[in-house]
Image (cartoon, rainbow, N blue to C red):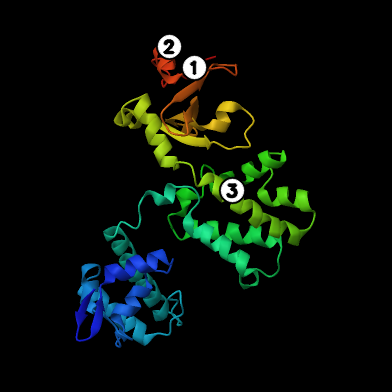
Protein backbone atom coordinates (compact mmCIF):
# COMPACT_ATOMS: atom_id res chain seq x y z
CA UNK A 1 0.00 0.00 0.00
CA UNK A 2 1.15 3.57 -0.67
CA UNK A 3 0.17 6.88 0.86
CA UNK A 4 -1.81 9.21 -1.45
CA UNK A 5 -2.89 12.53 0.10
CA UNK A 6 -3.43 11.02 3.53
CA UNK A 7 -5.34 8.19 1.92
CA UNK A 8 -4.17 4.61 1.70
CA UNK A 9 -4.35 3.39 -1.88
CA UNK A 10 -5.21 -0.30 -1.58
CA UNK A 11 -3.94 -2.52 -4.39
CA UNK A 12 -6.45 -4.97 -5.78
CA UNK A 13 -4.04 -7.91 -5.30
CA UNK A 14 -3.74 -7.10 -1.58
CA UNK A 15 -7.51 -6.98 -1.23
CA UNK A 16 -7.88 -10.26 -3.13
CA UNK A 17 -5.51 -11.99 -0.70
CA UNK A 18 -7.48 -10.64 2.26
CA UNK A 19 -10.83 -11.64 0.72
CA UNK A 20 -9.51 -15.10 -0.01
CA UNK A 21 -8.30 -15.60 3.57
CA UNK A 22 -11.68 -14.45 4.91
CA UNK A 23 -13.51 -16.68 2.41
CA UNK A 24 -15.24 -13.65 0.83
CA UNK A 25 -16.19 -13.88 -2.84
CA UNK A 26 -13.66 -12.09 -5.03
CA UNK A 27 -16.46 -10.78 -7.24
CA UNK A 28 -17.09 -8.17 -4.55
CA UNK A 29 -13.77 -6.61 -5.53
CA UNK A 30 -15.44 -5.42 -8.73
CA UNK A 31 -17.92 -3.45 -6.66
CA UNK A 32 -15.14 -1.82 -4.62
CA UNK A 33 -13.05 -0.84 -7.62
CA UNK A 34 -15.88 0.27 -9.94
CA UNK A 35 -18.16 2.08 -7.49
CA UNK A 36 -18.51 5.80 -8.15
CA UNK A 37 -17.60 6.43 -4.52
CA UNK A 38 -14.31 4.54 -4.39
CA UNK A 39 -13.32 5.71 -0.90
CA UNK A 40 -14.17 3.98 2.37
CA UNK A 41 -12.84 5.66 5.46
CA UNK A 42 -9.13 6.14 4.91
CA UNK A 43 -8.97 3.64 2.03
CA UNK A 44 -8.99 4.44 -1.67
CA UNK A 45 -9.44 1.98 -4.54
CA UNK A 46 -7.89 2.70 -7.93
CA UNK A 47 -10.24 1.56 -10.76
CA UNK A 48 -7.34 1.40 -13.23
CA UNK A 49 -6.07 -1.76 -11.52
CA UNK A 50 -9.02 -3.74 -12.94
CA UNK A 51 -7.69 -3.17 -16.47
CA UNK A 52 -5.17 -5.90 -15.79
CA UNK A 53 -7.98 -8.46 -15.60
CA UNK A 54 -10.76 -7.07 -17.82
CA UNK A 55 -10.87 -5.10 -21.06
CA UNK A 56 -12.01 -1.49 -21.12
CA UNK A 57 -15.22 -2.52 -22.88
CA UNK A 58 -15.99 -5.18 -20.27
CA UNK A 59 -15.42 -2.74 -17.40
CA UNK A 60 -17.71 -0.13 -18.97
CA UNK A 61 -20.34 -2.77 -19.70
CA UNK A 62 -20.15 -4.08 -16.13
CA UNK A 63 -20.61 -0.59 -14.64
CA UNK A 64 -23.53 0.17 -16.97
CA UNK A 65 -25.31 -3.06 -16.09
CA UNK A 66 -24.85 -2.52 -12.36
CA UNK A 67 -26.31 0.98 -12.63
CA UNK A 68 -29.23 -0.13 -14.78
CA UNK A 69 -30.47 -3.10 -12.86
CA UNK A 70 -31.17 -3.96 -9.24
CA UNK A 71 -28.84 -6.74 -8.08
CA UNK A 72 -28.76 -9.03 -5.14
CA UNK A 73 -25.66 -10.67 -3.63
CA UNK A 74 -25.54 -13.25 -6.40
CA UNK A 75 -25.76 -10.66 -9.20
CA UNK A 76 -29.16 -11.92 -10.28
CA UNK A 77 -30.73 -9.21 -12.46
CA UNK A 78 -34.41 -8.50 -11.94
CA UNK A 79 -35.96 -8.28 -15.37
CA UNK A 80 -37.36 -10.18 -18.34
CA UNK A 81 -36.19 -10.84 -21.90
CA UNK A 82 -33.44 -8.24 -22.21
CA UNK A 83 -32.79 -8.56 -18.50
CA UNK A 84 -32.06 -12.27 -18.85
CA UNK A 85 -29.47 -11.61 -21.56
CA UNK A 86 -27.86 -8.88 -19.49
CA UNK A 87 -27.83 -11.15 -16.46
CA UNK A 88 -25.92 -13.81 -18.41
CA UNK A 89 -23.47 -11.21 -19.70
CA UNK A 90 -22.91 -9.80 -16.23
CA UNK A 91 -22.19 -13.26 -14.83
CA UNK A 92 -19.74 -13.92 -17.65
CA UNK A 93 -17.77 -10.76 -16.84
CA UNK A 94 -17.72 -11.51 -13.12
CA UNK A 95 -16.56 -15.09 -13.64
CA UNK A 96 -13.86 -13.98 -16.07
CA UNK A 97 -12.54 -11.49 -13.52
CA UNK A 98 -12.69 -14.06 -10.71
CA UNK A 99 -10.79 -16.64 -12.75
CA UNK A 100 -8.18 -14.14 -13.97
CA UNK A 101 -7.29 -12.72 -10.57
CA UNK A 102 -7.15 -16.17 -8.96
CA UNK A 103 -4.80 -17.33 -11.67
CA UNK A 104 -2.63 -14.23 -11.20
CA UNK A 105 -2.37 -14.75 -7.46
CA UNK A 106 -2.17 -18.57 -7.73
CA UNK A 107 -5.17 -18.87 -5.42
CA UNK A 108 -6.43 -21.76 -7.54
CA UNK A 109 -3.60 -24.16 -6.75
CA UNK A 110 -3.50 -27.83 -5.86
CA UNK A 111 -5.34 -27.29 -2.61
CA UNK A 112 -8.59 -28.41 -4.18
CA UNK A 113 -7.06 -31.91 -4.21
CA UNK A 114 -6.09 -31.83 -0.55
CA UNK A 115 -8.28 -33.42 2.06
CA UNK A 116 -11.78 -32.01 2.19
CA UNK A 117 -12.56 -28.90 0.19
CA UNK A 118 -12.05 -25.94 2.53
CA UNK A 119 -15.18 -24.15 1.32
CA UNK A 120 -17.38 -27.13 2.11
CA UNK A 121 -15.65 -27.65 5.44
CA UNK A 122 -16.19 -24.03 6.45
CA UNK A 123 -19.86 -24.11 5.43
CA UNK A 124 -20.49 -27.26 7.45
CA UNK A 125 -18.81 -25.83 10.54
CA UNK A 126 -20.79 -22.60 10.12
CA UNK A 127 -24.03 -24.60 10.06
CA UNK A 128 -23.06 -25.92 13.49
CA UNK A 129 -23.01 -22.40 14.94
CA UNK A 130 -26.15 -21.13 13.15
CA UNK A 131 -28.18 -24.16 12.07
CA UNK A 132 -31.53 -22.40 11.72
CA UNK A 133 -30.05 -20.01 9.16
CA UNK A 134 -29.60 -22.94 6.75
CA UNK A 135 -31.99 -25.65 7.90
CA UNK A 136 -35.66 -25.85 8.80
CA UNK A 137 -34.85 -27.77 11.97
CA UNK A 138 -31.95 -29.42 13.80
CA UNK A 139 -32.20 -32.72 11.98
CA UNK A 140 -29.53 -35.00 10.56
CA UNK A 141 -31.80 -35.61 7.56
CA UNK A 142 -32.01 -31.87 6.87
CA UNK A 143 -28.22 -31.63 7.15
CA UNK A 144 -27.73 -34.57 4.79
CA UNK A 145 -29.97 -32.96 2.16
CA UNK A 146 -28.23 -29.60 2.63
CA UNK A 147 -24.74 -31.03 2.05
CA UNK A 148 -25.89 -33.04 -0.98
CA UNK A 149 -27.39 -29.88 -2.48
CA UNK A 150 -24.10 -28.01 -2.01
CA UNK A 151 -22.14 -30.74 -3.76
CA UNK A 152 -24.62 -31.15 -6.61
CA UNK A 153 -25.09 -27.42 -7.05
CA UNK A 154 -21.35 -26.84 -7.14
CA UNK A 155 -20.96 -29.53 -9.76
CA UNK A 156 -23.71 -28.03 -11.93
CA UNK A 157 -22.17 -24.57 -11.68
CA UNK A 158 -18.82 -25.95 -12.80
CA UNK A 159 -16.95 -25.19 -9.60
CA UNK A 160 -13.70 -26.91 -8.74
CA UNK A 161 -15.48 -29.16 -6.25
CA UNK A 162 -16.15 -31.91 -8.78
CA UNK A 163 -12.68 -33.45 -8.40
CA UNK A 164 -12.53 -32.84 -4.66
CA UNK A 165 -15.93 -34.19 -3.73
CA UNK A 166 -16.01 -37.36 -5.79
CA UNK A 167 -15.98 -40.90 -4.42
CA UNK A 168 -12.19 -40.84 -4.22
CA UNK A 169 -11.91 -37.73 -2.09
CA UNK A 170 -11.39 -37.57 1.65
CA UNK A 171 -14.91 -36.21 2.08
CA UNK A 172 -16.12 -39.32 0.30
CA UNK A 173 -14.44 -41.39 3.01
CA UNK A 174 -16.43 -39.87 5.87
CA UNK A 175 -19.16 -42.52 5.64
CA UNK A 176 -16.59 -45.31 5.39
CA UNK A 177 -14.67 -43.82 8.30
CA UNK A 178 -17.82 -43.89 10.46
CA UNK A 179 -18.68 -47.41 9.29
CA UNK A 180 -15.26 -48.70 10.35
CA UNK A 181 -15.46 -46.87 13.66
CA UNK A 182 -18.85 -48.32 14.60
CA UNK A 183 -18.49 -51.58 12.65
CA UNK A 184 -21.55 -50.75 10.57
CA UNK A 185 -22.37 -51.91 7.06
CA UNK A 186 -19.89 -50.14 4.78
CA UNK A 187 -22.55 -49.38 2.17
CA UNK A 188 -24.48 -47.23 4.65
CA UNK A 189 -24.23 -43.46 4.42
CA UNK A 190 -23.07 -41.32 7.34
CA UNK A 191 -26.63 -40.17 8.01
CA UNK A 192 -27.88 -43.74 8.38
CA UNK A 193 -24.95 -44.69 10.59
CA UNK A 194 -25.55 -41.79 12.97
CA UNK A 195 -29.27 -42.56 13.16
CA UNK A 196 -28.38 -46.17 13.92
CA UNK A 197 -26.34 -44.91 16.87
CA UNK A 198 -28.70 -42.23 18.22
CA UNK A 199 -32.23 -43.15 17.02
CA UNK A 200 -33.09 -39.44 17.13
CA UNK A 201 -32.76 -36.80 14.37
CA UNK A 202 -31.59 -33.97 16.62
CA UNK A 203 -29.17 -36.07 18.66
CA UNK A 204 -27.72 -37.48 15.43
CA UNK A 205 -27.38 -33.92 14.16
CA UNK A 206 -25.27 -32.95 17.18
CA UNK A 207 -23.32 -36.21 16.96
CA UNK A 208 -22.39 -35.42 13.35
CA UNK A 209 -20.32 -32.38 14.28
CA UNK A 210 -18.48 -34.27 17.01
CA UNK A 211 -17.57 -37.01 14.56
CA UNK A 212 -16.84 -34.56 11.73
CA UNK A 213 -14.29 -32.66 13.83
CA UNK A 214 -12.54 -35.91 14.79
CA UNK A 215 -12.53 -36.90 11.13
CA UNK A 216 -10.97 -33.58 10.07
CA UNK A 217 -8.27 -33.85 12.72
CA UNK A 218 -7.35 -37.24 11.33
CA UNK A 219 -7.46 -36.76 7.55
CA UNK A 220 -5.83 -33.32 7.48
CA UNK A 221 -2.55 -34.87 8.60
CA UNK A 222 -2.31 -36.92 5.41
CA UNK A 223 -1.02 -36.18 1.93
CA UNK A 224 -3.19 -35.00 -0.93
CA UNK A 225 -4.57 -37.48 -3.43
CA UNK A 226 -2.53 -35.90 -6.22
CA UNK A 227 0.68 -36.06 -4.20
CA UNK A 228 0.24 -39.77 -3.42
CA UNK A 229 -0.47 -40.61 -7.06
CA UNK A 230 2.59 -38.68 -8.26
CA UNK A 231 4.83 -40.37 -5.68
CA UNK A 232 3.63 -43.82 -6.78
CA UNK A 233 3.95 -43.15 -10.51
CA UNK A 234 7.51 -41.88 -10.07
CA UNK A 235 8.49 -45.21 -8.57
CA UNK A 236 6.52 -47.30 -11.05
CA UNK A 237 7.56 -45.79 -14.36
CA UNK A 238 8.08 -42.56 -16.27
CA UNK A 239 5.08 -40.21 -15.86
CA UNK A 240 4.81 -39.84 -19.65
CA UNK A 241 4.69 -43.62 -20.04
CA UNK A 242 1.91 -43.80 -17.45
CA UNK A 243 -0.19 -41.52 -19.68
CA UNK A 244 0.80 -43.25 -22.90
CA UNK A 245 -0.40 -46.58 -21.52
CA UNK A 246 -3.77 -45.02 -20.62
CA UNK A 247 -3.42 -45.92 -16.96
CA UNK A 248 -5.49 -44.35 -14.19
CA UNK A 249 -4.88 -44.28 -10.44
CA UNK A 250 -7.57 -44.06 -7.79
CA UNK A 251 -7.03 -43.51 -4.09
CA UNK A 252 -8.97 -46.36 -2.54
CA UNK A 253 -8.07 -45.71 1.08
CA UNK A 254 -5.81 -43.63 3.30
CA UNK A 255 -4.08 -44.53 6.63
CA UNK A 256 -7.33 -44.83 8.55
CA UNK A 257 -6.83 -45.70 12.21
CA UNK A 258 -10.01 -47.79 12.14
CA UNK A 259 -8.80 -50.05 9.33
CA UNK A 260 -8.33 -53.59 10.62
CA UNK A 261 -5.36 -54.80 8.60
CA UNK A 262 -1.88 -53.47 9.32
CA UNK A 263 -0.91 -52.16 5.90
CA UNK A 264 -4.31 -50.60 5.25
CA UNK A 265 -4.02 -48.82 8.57
CA UNK A 266 -0.52 -47.54 7.88
CA UNK A 267 -0.61 -46.94 4.14
CA UNK A 268 -2.42 -45.27 1.30
CA UNK A 269 -4.15 -47.81 -0.91
CA UNK A 270 -3.96 -47.00 -4.62
CA UNK A 271 -5.67 -48.98 -7.38
CA UNK A 272 -4.38 -48.84 -10.95
CA UNK A 273 -6.69 -49.33 -13.94
CA UNK A 274 -6.07 -49.73 -17.67
CA UNK A 275 -8.43 -47.65 -19.80
CA UNK A 276 -9.44 -48.60 -23.32
CA UNK A 277 -12.27 -47.88 -25.76
CA UNK A 278 -14.73 -50.64 -26.49
CA UNK A 279 -16.79 -50.53 -29.71
CA UNK A 280 -19.88 -51.67 -27.87
CA UNK A 281 -19.58 -50.13 -24.42
CA UNK A 282 -17.33 -47.15 -25.09
CA UNK A 283 -14.78 -46.17 -22.45
CA UNK A 284 -13.97 -49.14 -20.24
CA UNK A 285 -11.56 -49.80 -17.38
CA UNK A 286 -9.81 -52.98 -16.30
CA UNK A 287 -8.37 -53.38 -12.84
CA UNK A 288 -4.63 -54.15 -12.85
CA UNK A 289 -3.06 -53.89 -9.40
CA UNK A 290 -3.33 -52.39 -5.91
CA UNK A 291 -0.34 -50.69 -4.30
CA UNK A 292 0.16 -49.78 -0.64
CA UNK A 293 2.17 -46.60 -0.10
CA UNK A 294 3.69 -45.67 3.24
CA UNK A 295 2.30 -42.46 4.73
CA UNK A 296 5.67 -40.73 4.13
CA UNK A 297 5.49 -41.86 0.48
CA UNK A 298 8.89 -43.56 0.68
CA UNK A 299 8.03 -47.28 0.67
CA UNK A 300 5.60 -49.15 -1.58
CA UNK A 301 4.26 -52.69 -1.10
CA UNK A 302 2.20 -55.02 -3.29
CA UNK A 303 -0.02 -57.80 -2.03
CA UNK A 304 0.76 -61.31 -3.15
CA UNK A 305 -2.19 -62.81 -5.05
CA UNK A 306 -4.77 -64.51 -2.80
CA UNK A 307 -2.70 -63.97 0.35
CA UNK A 308 -2.32 -61.42 3.13
CA UNK A 309 1.43 -61.28 2.55
CA UNK A 310 3.18 -58.35 0.90
CA UNK A 311 6.32 -57.82 -1.16
CA UNK A 312 8.34 -54.71 -1.94
CA UNK A 313 7.71 -52.76 -5.10
CA UNK A 314 11.23 -53.53 -6.34
CA UNK A 315 10.68 -57.29 -6.06
CA UNK A 316 7.25 -57.03 -7.65
CA UNK A 317 8.59 -55.14 -10.69
CA UNK A 318 11.34 -57.71 -11.14
CA UNK A 319 8.86 -60.59 -11.07
CA UNK A 320 6.18 -58.77 -13.10
CA UNK A 321 7.88 -56.40 -15.57
CA UNK A 322 4.74 -56.25 -17.74
CA UNK A 323 2.19 -55.92 -14.94
CA UNK A 324 0.52 -52.98 -16.72
CA UNK A 325 -0.32 -54.93 -19.90
CA UNK A 326 -3.93 -56.00 -20.24
CA UNK A 327 -5.01 -58.81 -22.54
CA UNK A 328 -8.67 -59.58 -23.11
CA UNK A 329 -9.52 -63.11 -22.07
CA UNK A 330 -10.73 -65.20 -24.96
CA UNK A 331 -13.11 -68.07 -24.43
Say what secondary structure mark 1 lies in. Answer: strand
Q: Position of residue 245 (x, y in %)?
A: 36, 27
Image quadrant where one finds the N terminus:
bottom left
Residue closer to the observer: 198 or 266? 266
Q: Kindly report which numbered mark, 2 or 1, lies closer to the viewer in this rendering.
A: 1
Q: Position of residue 155 (x, y in %)?
A: 49, 56
Question: In this figure, which residue is indicated by the disc labeled 2?
Answer: 319
Q: Residue at x 41, y 22 (%)?
A: 324
Circle number at residue 215: 3
Quarter assignment of residue 47: bottom left
Instruction: Count residues near mark 2 (Cα–Cα under 10 Å), then give few for <14, some for 14-19, many for 20+.
Output: few
Q: Position of residue 210 (x, y in %)?
A: 65, 55
- Please say if 243 is above or below 19: above
Circle number at residue 180: none
Say what secondary structure mark 2 lies in. Answer: helix
Contact between marks 2 and 1 (CB within 8 A): the answer is yes
Contact between marks 2 and 3 (CB within 8 A): the answer is no
Q: Residue at x 43, y 79 (%)?
A: 77
Q: Is residue 184 visible?
A: no
Instruction: Count residues near mark 1 (Cα–Cα under 10 Å), then give few for <14, some for 14-19, many for 20+.
Output: few
Image quadrant where one finds the C terminus:
top right
Instruction: Count residues near mark 3 (Cα–Cα under 10 Å), then give few for <14, some for 14-19, many for 20+.
Output: some
- Please say if 4 is above or below 93: below
- Please say if 142 is above or below 237: below
Q: Position of residue 116 (x, y in %)?
A: 50, 51
Amino acid sequence: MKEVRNKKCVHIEDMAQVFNQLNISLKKLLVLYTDSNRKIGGLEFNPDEIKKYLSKQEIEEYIALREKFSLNDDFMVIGLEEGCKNEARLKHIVRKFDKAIKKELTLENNKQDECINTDLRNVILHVETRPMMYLRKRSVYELDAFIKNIIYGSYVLGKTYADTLDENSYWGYFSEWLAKKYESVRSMGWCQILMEQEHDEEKAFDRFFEEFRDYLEEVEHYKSKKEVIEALVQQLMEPDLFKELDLEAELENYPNRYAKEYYERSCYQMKIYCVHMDERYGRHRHYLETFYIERDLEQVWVRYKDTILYQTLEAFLQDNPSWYEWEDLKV
